[in-house]
Image (tube, grey):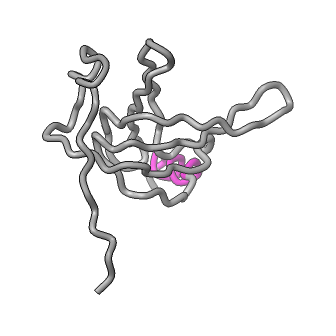
Amino acid sequence: MDLIKVAEEAFATGKKFPEFKSGDTVTVAYKIIEGSKERIQLYRGVVIKIAGHGDKKRFTVRKMSGTVGVERIFPIESPNIDSIEVNKIGKVRRAKLYYLRKLTGKKARIKEKRVNTAKA
């Protein structure tokens, strides 16, 4: 028995989240614990990076708070993540969108991929 695998399985949340990739706009519902109270905070932004694999997979979400860009890293297996919702599917050619940090205004927009939802 591998001790590392046993520890990873003990901390695995087993939650299923939708598939998303860099360039997608997502809303992450994250549990915030303040003293004895617990609340859910929504964090909406563009996924600029997905790193790692398996249980150690994490993604970085960038949003604009006023005129300041804010980035937050979320581990995919975090027990504090309540849900992840994909709002828009972005059309990008890169896996890491670090160039968005330098862009402001309309230049920082990402084209939206149109998805055909019609049923045959």
Residue 102 appears at what percent x and percent y?
Answer: 25, 14
Q: Residue at x 83, y 25 (%)?
A: 35
Above or below, comparing residue 2 to residue 16 in the picture = above
Front residue of 102/6: it is 102
In the image, is residue 4 part of the stretch drawn in magenta? yes
- In the rendered structure, the answer to whether residue 14 lies left or right of residue 47 reads right
Q: Residue at x 69, y 39 (%)?
A: 40
Residue 1 appears at what percent x and percent y?
Answer: 46, 57
Front residue of 31/8: it is 31
Q: Which residues are magenta?
A: 3-12
Above or below, comparing residue 88 to residue 46 in the picture = below
Q: Identify the image quadrant of the C terminus.
A: bottom left
- In the rendered structure, the answer to whether residue 60 lies left or right of residue 17 reads left
Q: Choose top left, top right, bottom left or bottom right for residue 46.
A: top left
In the image, is residue 78 part of the stretch drawn in magenta? no
Residue 54 appears at what percent x and percent y?
Answer: 37, 50
Front residue of 107/62: it is 107
- In the rendered structure, the answer to whether residue 61 lies left or right of residue 16 reads left
Residue closest to the far front: 106
Q: Choose top left, top right, bottom left or bottom right for residue 91.
A: top left
Q: Choose top left, top right, bottom left or bottom right for residue 32.
A: top right
- In the rendered structure, the answer to whether residue 108 lies left or right of residue 63 reads left
How many marks can you see? 0
Magenta span: helix, strand or loop, mainly?
Answer: helix
